[in-house]
Image (tube, helix red, strand yellow):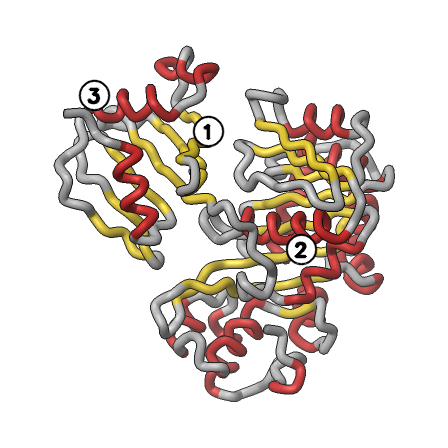
Amino acid sequence: MSFNIDGFLINAAKANASDIHLNCGHLPALRIKGQILKINEGILAYSDIEDILKKTIPEDFFVNVKSLKNIDYIYEIKNISRYRVNYCKDIYGGKLTFRTIPYEIKGLKELFLPEYLENYTHFNNGIVLVTGATGSGKSTTLSSMIELINKNYSKHIITIEDPVEFVYEEKKSIITQRNLELDVEDFQTGIKYALRQDPDVILVGEIRDKDTLLSAIEASETGHLVFSTLHTNGTIDSINRLKGFLEETTERNFISRLAQSIRGIVHQTLVPTVHQTLVPAVELLTFSSTVKDYVMNSKFDDIYSLMQKTRQPGIFTLNSYLHNLYKEGIITKETAYDYSLEKVEMNQLLRGVYKVGNDDSENSIL
């Protein structure tokens, strides 16, 4: 009997699994509350993987599945969930990973995200970046901000994704959603044609190269608000990555254009709580005139020092956020230390050697 993928996904949904791993020659596995659990339903055969592909993959992709090493697509079980699916070839014959995408788009408060992020939805132009590792909730955070615009403004929102994840129900805004490869060749081309479609807001799934970044900067300079993601560790690392992309160009003023275009960088990671759930820990860098000046002059130490000392609600470090989560009893001291990007500083915070600028119960960043 072939593997019943729909039945398995339905049971995974009941177990609140965030990810489903189906690897040829191995037991199926689920990620629940951040932990991988193997399910004893029999080892998956190559024929099982083939059958799952035939049932779930778009017809346009299945024609070329044997020649492709990686494929991303969306699968949906009505009234259960949507899934972002990745198929990759490996030494065992092939693997499928299903990431659960809930139908409901949650608000910032429901996601335990800083309410300050709503400020980024009020801009008419510029670039807002959400950064972090794979599986850190970047797409969920973006969807929450896009939904705020959808609810509150009469605008045209265009999303260019690989693949389209959250599907929006139009409210005050109108929304156009495009899949990479199925609807548009690449992100750069998607932005190019989006500018001809009367947009106000453009969501670009990921900035992967200099051409996409330059296209995003051009879109922001011509009066559009652009949201996108980067796979980086922290806000300073994000600025370095962007500069690295642009240093390949011959344009003299690329750093100035970059600094003037970015409205803010949100870095996040998911951390385990004392209640065995996951919450985002966030680092936030809103681009004030001072930050822009530091970026243009590559004063990265000064940027981080500002983030440590300022009491502005739109600027704070990951360490200060983790420390607040610990002080409020949401995470343990060990978790705060383990997920810190600056462990010497975090150790000093936990020992009470010094306080950061917004480490104050009356000025909570949560």
The image quarter in which residue 304 lies: bottom right
Residue 129 as seen in the image, left or right of residue 293: left
Name of the residue lying farthest toward the top: 63
Query: Which amino acid lies under the numbered mark 1 shown in the image of this protein?
Result: Tyr
Query: Is any atom of residue 320 visible in this view?
Result: yes
The C terminus: image quadrant: bottom right
Identify the residue under disc 2: 265
Callout 3 environment at 10 Å: few (<14), some (14 to 19), or many (20+)?
Answer: few
Q: Secondary structure at mark 2?
A: strand
Q: Pinpoint residue 30: horizontal percent, then vertical percent.
A: 28, 47
Q: Secondary structure at mark 1?
A: strand
Query: Which amino acid lies under the numbered mark 3 shown in the image of this protein?
Result: Ser
Question: Tag 1 or tag 2, which sits nearer the N-term?
Answer: 1
Residue 92, which numbered label? none
Query: Which amino acid lies under the numbered mark 2 shown in the image of this protein?
Result: Ile
Residue 73, which numbered label? 1
Q: Secondary structure at mark 3?
A: helix
Q: Identify the residue at horizontal 75%, vertical 42% (top origin).
A: 173
Question: Tag 3 or tag 2, which sits nearer the N-term?
Answer: 3
Q: Pinpoint residue 341: horizontal percent, then vertical percent.
A: 50, 64
The image quarter in which residue 67 lies: top left
Q: Pinpoint residue 197: horizontal percent, then vertical percent.
A: 79, 27
Q: Identify the residue at horizontal 49%, vertical 74% (top origin).
A: 344
Query: Is any atom of residue 300 visible in this view?
Result: no
Identify the residue under disc 3: 47
The N terminus: image quadrant: top left
